[in-house]
Image: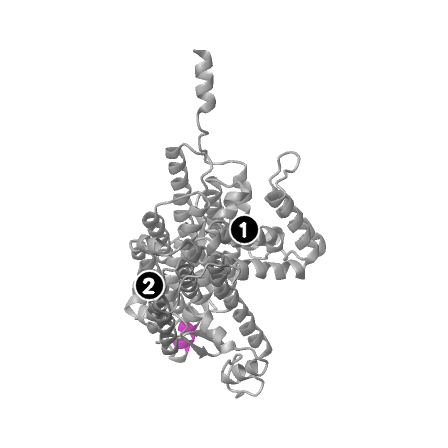
Amino acid sequence: MAAEVSCSAAAAPPRARWFVRGDVDGFFGLALDNLVQLLLIDSLCRGVVGLPDELVRGRILPGAAVSLLVGNLYYSWQALRLARAEGRADRCALPYGINTVSLFAYVFLVMLPARLAAERLGLPDPPTIAWRAGLAAAFGAGLIETFGAFVAPWLKRVTPRAALLSTLAGVALGFIGLGFLFRTFARPLIGFTTLAIVLLTYFGRVRFRGGLPGGLVAVAVGAVIAHLTGLAPPLPDAPLAWHAPTASISALFAALREGALLDHFAVIVPMGLFALIGSLQNLESAEAAGDTYPVKRSLAVNGIGTLVAALCGSCFPTTLYIGHPGWKALGARVGYSALSGVVMAALCCSGALALVASFVPIDAGMAIVLWIGLVITAQAFQATPREHAPAVVVGLLPGVAAWGVLLAKQGLQIGGATAAVDATQSGAPLGPAQVDAFLRFDTWIAGGFALEQGFILSSMVLAALTVAVIERKFVRAALWCVAGAALSACGLLHSWRFAGADAVLALAPAWPFVGAYLAMGACFLAAPFLTRPHDDAGH
């Protein structure tokens, strides 16, 4: 009997716990990611939009704190509940935080224009008007994310995994991998040292003596090097002060009455759709890593997090983060997400953001973020059928291209674009003259601008139709072309215009691309009549 009990106990599955050792590594990675977004909010809202401290640190950051708590605590609880129901201990919670793309879009395309327009019209208190416009934009995106959750399962069923994962891989390779690779080589001592620790721990599969987590060692060593070499920022002068979250419903309704939703419709709609699709892709990424979560519920909670942000004073939507397979490979399970939410909320409400950034600069953890980008890119190939590899490469291209276009535009803005513009104009204009200059060097930047707008959607469409062609499902390939044509006709894809120092989404029909997608679809429909299968590799 004792032997039977012993054998039964030995065979019992491990019980999932709230916190394990690997959650320490996961916490540092996710917390660093969220910390970067919060520091950007603080600096851009005050430095670019010109919002006063009482709005940024008294209303926006505490509102972001509530939205981070709502999502991170829920996704940790969700992972723990499902892990215990399944009798497994390796389930990893979905990563969650501020949406980086929307952050920049709302600052530069919603809040700043709203302030400038208010100043031109002589309206009182332009900073408050800019803040209210941001609240309306976040609220609109939250509605799209919440109600879009109910159609997302259908979208998931009809979209090949290669199309979903390669889109993420393009973002990871360009905006995360290459971006932080530049930073690594710009500061090689701290970059190479921390990268060596990360590679040893996660690719070499070794552990430090004493059981120290590799992520903690990398961040600690990086922080020491940063302080010894003078890379760490100075300590802030501002004292710590507690700012409790405050409901901002009256400010939000004022913005809605002022027509802020319609004024910024061209930004809100694509940002909301991109956030919905991006979160769906991250759910697919989690499933490919072995963790399947309810699609509707997971996406709806993400949308609710954005709505809560707007109702509590934050202008910035939340999203399911890219990187679930990376966090899981680190050994993170349930607690890393909840701990990140609690710590980030405390930083937002206490005014301690600048203090933390001084002690643990971004450079100290950039090797972990670089590794996450590598893992996501690799997963796009590892978790899809081998024969779909060409489709993954096709899906990678728009994201990498969009990152390259961003660098080109930033270069123009830094260089002043044209020195011969009217002295009454401010900023660095971008226009046909720069397009012609690129063309003289055989760089077709106009095509890059078209590819950049809606690149998340175009990546999905191109990868999905490539999968259909590989499988010789030519009607399905043609239907994906029709989807591309419809998105182009709605102005969500390839539609762009010049806007001062930038090229932005125009939200107007991109007719050349409508015709191009339809022509491509016609080729696929004609294929069964004009071609025959040919699998002989030798000919």
x and y, in percent, of residue 353 in the image: 53, 53
In this view, the residue farthest toward the top is 1
161 or 451, which is in the foreground? 161
Residue shown at 32% from the left, 50% from the top: 296
Position of residue 87 in the picture relative to residue 187 (left or right): left
x and y, in percent, of residue 316 in the image: 42, 60
477 or 501, which is in the foreground? 477
- Badge 2 marks a residue whose secondary structure is helix
Query: Which label sits in the foreground, 1 or 2?
Result: 2
The amino acid beneath tag 2 is Val
| Magenta segment | 113-119
Sequence-wise first label, 1 or 2: 1
Picture quarter with the N terminus: top left
Tag shown at residue 274:
none
Above or below, 446 against 55 in this view is below
260 or 30, which is in the foreground? 30
The answer to whether residue 264 shows anywhere in this view is no
Q: Does the magenta stretch include residue 116?
A: yes
Return the residue at label 2. Answer: 475
The answer to whether residue 396 shows anywhere in this view is yes
Q: How many marks?
A: 2
Instruction: Kindly indicate the quadrant of the structure image that contains residue 111.
Output: bottom left
Position of residue 438 in the picture relative to residue 479 (left or right): right
Residue shown at 58% from the left, 74% from the top: 411
Q: Is residue 423 magenta?
A: no
Return the residue at label 1. Answer: 375
* Gap between marks 1 and 2 measured at Cα: 34 Å
Residue shown at 43% from the left, 34% from the top: 88
The amino acid beneath tag 1 is Val
- Badge 1 marks a residue whose secondary structure is helix
Main SS of residues in magenta: helix
Above or below, 28 against 188 in this view is above
